Amino acid sequence: MSTLRVPVDRDLSIDFARALCLPVVVLLHALQMGIGGDPLRAFNALDGFEPLAWATWPLMIMPVFFICGGFAAITQWRRLRGHGETVAHYVRLRVIRLARPVVSVAAAVGIVLALMLAAGADDEFVRTFAVRLAEPLWFIPVYIACTALVPVMSTVHRHAPWAGYLGLAGAVVVVDLLVRATGLPIGPFNWLFVWLFAQQLGFGLRDGWFARRSRATLWAMAAGSYGVIVVLVTVFGYSHDMLDNLNPPTLCILALALGQVSLFALAQPAIRGAMQRRALLGGVYVFGVYGMVIYLWHTFAMAVVVGAQAIVGLPFPAVLSPAWWATRPLWIAAIAIVVALCCLVVPRLEARWPDPVERRTPLVAVIAWMVIAIAGVGVILTQGYVPWQVGVAGWVLVTGAVIALTIGGPGPRAVPAPAPAQTQMARDGNPDPRLVQ
């Protein structure tokens, strides 16, 4: 079988991990979409389904996205910094890239829901359906916030890596203790602390800390991490369902992130070897190119399939019944077909967005528009995709923030200062000497 030379400036094992996790997330979302009752309502079909609860121990792979994201983000930041770019420029590019796809998918799903209402669908069903469809959007504002903090957290990683890890882990412990002991509503702080910790693990992966550990050490770290989860569940009363520990994240998810990065580091040499194969590389390439389309637009696909099913008059089997399970392959196949069509169409439409104007934008302005974008996505997330209700305000906020960041300014067009070759090499590639110890 023919092989390909792995590019020296890209670790394809990271692309493989992302490609492997994406179908798992989409499949889980598709199975969770429950529709039933009289009148019809949308709900979580797998809520309380015990086999899934235990399956989340290996299948809860959201930490992998943030670990891989940290690997990619610090690489991009070092490259931009090596070319004389600013923090404002980096954050601006990240917010545009993550928020802009929300504008089009929110509009598209809203149109489908409007057509369902026009065809006579029950208002409350459409509302509950719109909220369920919007749930995957939680990833966008959290990821925007974490990647926007990469310049700060990379400095922490460079000068005091262990302080960064232990500080974030300690913050998660404090939040969990206060929530469980006093009931204070501060759990959402862990949306930041837990995922920043996972992102920092990606920094360590990028700089080779895990690669320099022995296999025995990595196995011990993985076993210890999952052992911590066992103790948290059996002794301290944490839920054994990792989905329950995800919203908001708890210490279980932090331990899961450490276990997953350890296992990934163990498998990384084999993955790199496998990525030399053209067929596997081609599959990973597809998921890499269309990853954002697949993640966001599979909700549009579900809206289209449910709308078509309602119009045709096909019944919705009782959730978890034999008929429901028997129809899941057809349900998933129909979603996959619509997603595949979206992969052909959506990138061409999004290519019509103008490129960001190369103009210096003050960091305070970038942060302000970033907060507006996060707030807009948050409104859509909590209110659903129904555009004629409060959700339209979220869409307006996100759209306005993306347009403002694309235009940029005020200020002259940016002319990045060239970086000396040695400085650029040090910033792009060389790990911090403290991590070699």
Image: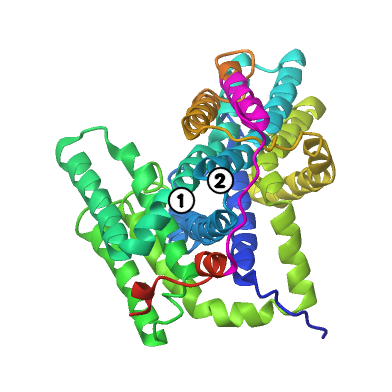
Q: Is residue 43 visible?
A: no
The percent position of residue 376, horizontal first and vertical second, equals: 54, 25
In space, the residues marked 1 and 2 are separated at their CA atoms by 9 Å
Instruction: Give, as a three-letter code, the residue at label 2.
Output: Tyr
Question: Residues in magenta?
Answer: 394-421
Q: Nearer the viewer, mark 1 or mark 2?
A: 2
Residue 385 location, quadrant = top right
**Mark 2 residue element:** helix
Give the label on residue 35, or none.
none
- The residue to which callout 2 is attached is 90
Q: Residue at x 57, y 16 (%)?
A: 393
Viewer-closest of 277 and 382 = 277
| Residues at discs 1 and 2 in contact (Cβ within 8 Å) | yes
Image quarter (top left, top right, bottom left or bottom right) of the C terminus: bottom left
- Is 414 left, or right, of 238 in this rendering? right
The percent position of residue 300, horizontal first and vertical second, equals: 71, 35
Image quarter (top left, top right, bottom left or bottom right) of the N terminus: bottom right
Instruction: Give, as a three-letter code, the residue at label 1.
Output: Val
Give the label on residue 150, or none.
1
Viewer-closest of 350 and 116 = 350
- Residue 289: within the magenta? no
**Mark 1 residue element:** helix
- Is 239 left, or right, of 316 in this rendering? left
The percent position of residue 146, horizontal first and vertical second, equals: 45, 46
Q: Residue at x 24, y 46 (%)?
A: 176
The percent position of residue 344, horizontal first and vertical second, equals: 84, 46
Which class describes the residues within 10 Å of circle 2: few (<14), some (14-19), or many (20+)? many
Q: Residue at x 84, y 41 (%)?
A: 348
Sequence-earlier tag: 1 or 2: 2
**Vertical placement of 419 versus 90: above or below?**
below
**Vertical placement of 406 versus 287: above or below?**
above
